[in-house]
Image (tube, rainbow, N blue to C red):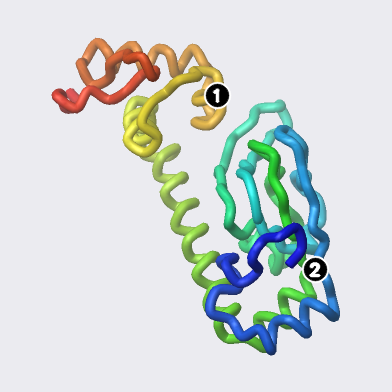
Amino acid sequence: MAGGFRLYDMPLFRGSEPEVVDPILKKSPGRYSSYGKGDFIAMQNSVCRSLYLLCEGSVYAQMTNDEGKVFVLDALDAPDVLASTFIFGTEGLLPVSIIAHTDCKLWIVDKMCVLELLEKDHAVLRNFLTVLSDHSLFLSGKLNDFALQTLSSRVIGYLSKNGSVQNLQETAFILGVARPSLSRAIAQLIEQGVVRKSGSGYVLNRCRGVK
């Protein structure tokens, strides 16, 4: 167990058979790496040859267009599986950058090792399919947020999930909008009585509904 993490507590290996998994991993050992906050773990459009198992800390996935505009696609906390949606893709490319949001540790497993694990252990296969489905569901929700919801609705959804907005710049980055746009949306929600400012930042006013 590299770095002290418990292999069979990881989402990919829960319920799997050690007598099947251990020999495969010993034959093709992964790379256990540490990253500091802000470090790039993988770059957008790089070749995706491995599965990234987030053992400690948190990361976020972001996309950058040709004009330099940044969109945060996802934020993930350990334990979780990264790049599951892309590792077996036809193009074999990672369409996002993975960046350490905090100090974190990852176990990086080669693609062919992952394939052998999927072929030989049914629990690993089921877990992998669950991870794929959960990440696809999340991406569908993200698409709904950006394509079908107003910024005000997205702010309310963010507050419902996270409790407060303490840092406007960081929240604007996560929501993929400019800070002035977020400030205007919050000001409108305050005027409507939906949001109020508290000692912990901007929070939902539970006594009022959305107008």
Q: Residues within 10 Å of mark 1 (few under 14, many from 20)?
A: few
Which kind of residue does numbered mark 1 sit on?
Glu
The kind of secondary structure element at disc 1 is: helix
Q: Nearer the viewer, residue 65 or 125?
A: 125
The kind of secondary structure element at disc 2 is: strand
Tell me if residue 86 comes above or below residue 208 in the rendering: below
Q: Which residue is mark 1?
A: 170
Q: Nearer the viewer, residue 120 or 37?
A: 37
In the rendered structure, the answer to whether residue 11 lies left or right of residue 187 reads right
Q: Earlier in the sequence, mark 2 or mark 1?
A: 2
Label disc, if present, on residue 49 of the rendered structure? none
Q: CA distance from mark 2 to mark 1?
A: 33 Å
Task: Name the residue at 58% across, 79% down.
Answer: 125
Residue 72: image quadrant is top right
Residue 130, can we see it? yes
Q: Which residue is mark 2?
A: 110
In the rendered structure, the answer to whether residue 42 lies left or right of residue 187 reads right
Residue 150, can we see it? no
Q: Nearer the viewer, residue 125 or 150?
A: 125
Pick the quarter of the image with the C terminus: top left
Q: Position of residue 193 (x, y in %)?
A: 20, 16
Residue 115: image quadrant is bottom right
Q: Position of residue 70 (x, y in %)?
A: 64, 31
Residue projecting furthest to the front: 4
Tell me if residue 182 comes above or below residue 115 in the rendering: above
Q: Residues within 10 Å of mark 2 (few under 14, many from 20)?
A: some
Marks 2/1 in contact by CB < 8 Å: the verdict is no
Task: Name the residue at 79% across, 58% down.
Answer: 32
Q: Nearer the viewer, residue 84 or 38?
A: 38
Task: Name the residue at 67% across, 88% down.
Answer: 120
Q: Position of residue 33 (x, y in %)?
A: 80, 52
Which kind of residue does numbered mark 2 sit on?
Asp
